[in-house]
Image (cartoon, rainbow, N blue to C red):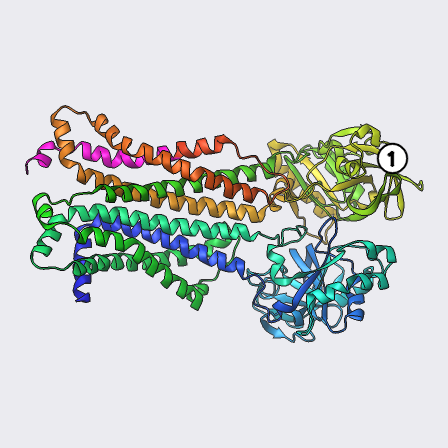
Amino acid sequence: MIRNYFKIAFRTLMHNKSYALINITGLALGLAACIVIFLVVQNELSYDQYHRKADRTYRVTLGGRDYNPSVAFAIAPAFKNDFPEAEVSQYFAQQGGLVSVGEQKYNQKVYAFADENFTKIFDFTWLSGNAETALKEPNTVILTESAARKYFHDRDAMGKIIKLNNEKDLRVTGVIKDLPSNTHLVFSFLVSWETIRKDVDTSHFWSIQGGMVYITLPKTESAKSVQARFPAFIQKNWEADIAKEKGLLLLQPLKEIHFDRRYLNQISMPRSKETIYGLAGVALFIILTACINFVNLATAQSLKRGKEVGIRKTLGAFRKQLIMQVMGETTLLVLVSVGLSLVAVTLFLPYTETLLDIRIETANLFKPEMIGAVLLIVVVTILLAGLYPAFIQSGFQPLKALKSGVSDNSNGKSYLRKGLVVVQFSITQILLVGTLIVGSQMDFFLNKDIGFDKDAIVTFSTGEKVDVLRQKLIDNPGVQQVSFASGGPAYNTNFAPFTSPELGMTENDVTEIKQVDENYLSMYHIKLLAGETITKIISKDTVANLVVNQTLITRLGIRDPGKAIGQRFFIGDRPIRIKGVVQDFQSESKHKKIRACVIMYNPNSFWQASVKLRPEKMRETLASIEKDWSELNPKSLFSYEFMDDRIAGLYNQEYKMYTAFRLFSAIAILIGCLGLYGLVSLMAVQRTKEIGIRKVMGASVPGLVVLFVNQFIWLILIAFVVAAPIAWFAMDKWLQEFAYHINIGPDIFLISIVTTLIIAGVTISHQSIKAALMNPIKSLRSE
């Protein structure tokens, strides 16, 4: 019997190829998008959970007024001494390094230093080497598989030598598989901590240079009990007054690092769980839209099969048999759609790294949880998409069905179908509003209120011969302006505590320190609000005269920049006098409030050159700069970064989500259009004779098209009333994650409703024009 159901279902679908094609396309798109989103969400929620000790592993971080994932290098050795029961590891990530292998040189973006405990706390897949001893000795290095292949091609890397930054010869003692995409750790190779241990300061608590400390606690010790011992630990090892700071050191669970938005100064930026759940919500919207699309098309098709159902019932078919027949057709359609969706997903997965910056292996499709999720989606889709059309079709009255070929359509059924379209329109407008708001926020990130000029500015290392390089850049006709500094406005490397007892500020706050030349403010168009600008003078006075930003004087309780001139505060123990105040500029991402900043002249810290290029000859100018730079630094490789790209990099996570929203919203809208097409087809079938009579009475084609369109205007308006508050609430909550964000204005909702009307109008017009052009004789001759 079941075989017979599927045989009839197959013949029916072959007889209605356009119906089958549209339905299969809509379902396949919906299922494919749903599966991809499931893989992305699964990947995001599983960050760092594959380590065996993940439940007991924590990162020691710095709390207080600000949250910093880095702590002083003094923490790890003191922690090992005072907490012998814990496994403690020092980790120090580096952005940018030169690797030499024989005569070949490579610019490596990210690598790290780590001690021997690192490979005991974290689990890696070892291709060669010993995890217990690989990082024990100085001048040793562990390579990832990609790095080993890059440096040594098909040769065995073990025991080979690589030179780091033209200084250290490192012997390869291990090769591990590339890190999975669901980890906050980012590196291409690990250098033993012993290589630099003697070169770093481990005596000062406030000497924060970017190092991170990880600990694994024994099963008998809780994080709460360890953290309760921190004040005594700080007081014992450092000055007693530091212990007065509340929440100074914190334990951050390893599994929460990827989701903790308090810590932003790290290579792998965190992402909020709300955003991930929002993406899962998009998947739900898509599969719901696909099912509504299926129901509308199936209902439209069932009305054309009224005579078939009438004959079946006359010959003795039971309602249960008719329901099983429709469910068989639905199951066949869904299974074909699943097959196509899996093929589409397999073809799409290699592009997820490019589009979404998330690497997902095809093998993930065959994991038990993924297979279970696909089966669940299939069952739910069959039930959602098949039951309603099955009950509608099996409920046709034989006499009416045989007389007209089309079953009657009660108001209840009509309202349900129209309600489904309202849901579709609502989903479409929610996704449209969400995409528009995310896009507007991305534009705000990159272009609005950053406080400095970023256009056509390129940054690169100053190299060894700083003064010679400066002169060559000034003489280059393609260069407008040049500035040397410790880092451009969007680069952050140096932070320190500051206080001002004279102004009543007794608790430490954190300030960024930028060491720049005399051209820095003018080239970046950073506005001077009061006092003097940066001058080419190295102060030898006990009290340093420096320029500060608005935020710093606000923290000191001063509102008027003019009144801040001459006021004093302390960076550590060093007294500082304010000689100038500049307007705030965005040196970090807009997730957090602008930080206090001190700007000073210091040629000893000119590590980065910033060059404003003339826009007409950028390519030629960059080639010329590279030639001059390479001649001055023959042992190094030239590498540059545009300031635009640097700022965009601060919002990689948001851009991933923006890309995902655009992609999956487009799929949802496309599926929604197919559903709308189905409902218009239903109307055309129901009103065939009415259209014929109207044409005979003189109705024009445009008039008939308007007749169809008018049926949907109020549905769109109802959907907008439903969608607008939902979209506003969800997106307003998302915007609260950022310290600076756009305001949701009425223009976004206006664009959404107009876009929806256009999309609906185009979709409706196609089918309604086709119905209006039909020869009235064909529709009326049966009467």
Q: Secondary structure at mark 1?
A: loop
Secondary structure mostly seen in magenta is helix
Horizontally, residue 173 falls left or right of residue 324, namely right
Which one is nearer the viewer's eye here, 178 or 375?
375
- Name the residue located 48 percent from the left edge and 38 percent from the top edge: 436
Q: Residue furthest top?
A: 698
- Name the residue located 66 percent from the left edge and 51 percent from the top edge: 262
- In the image, residue 160 lies at what x, y percent? 67, 70
Locate residue 532: give its quadrant: top right
- Which quadrant does the C terminus fall into? top left
Residue 501 in sight:
yes
Question: What residue type is disc 1 on?
Answer: Gln
Horizontally, residue 701 falls left or right of residue 657, namely left
Q: Residues within 10 Å of mark 1 (few under 14, many from 20)?
A: some
Locate residue 225: give its quadrant: bottom right
Magenta-colored stretch includes residue 767: yes
- In the image, residue 507 lies at what x, y percent? 82, 47
Report how many numbered discs are placed on residues in the image. Answer: 1
Magenta-colored stretch includes residue 176: no
- In the image, residue 689 lies at what x, y percent? 13, 35
Which one is nearer the viewer's eye here, 531 or 636?
531
The residue labelled by disc 1 is 567
Residue 222, placed above or below residue 477: below
Residue 169, placed above or below residue 727: below
Q: Which residues are magenta?
A: 756-783
- Name the residue located 15 percent from the left edge and 33 percent from the top edge: 690
Horizontally, residue 469 falls left or right of residue 744, namely right
Residue 367 in sight:
no
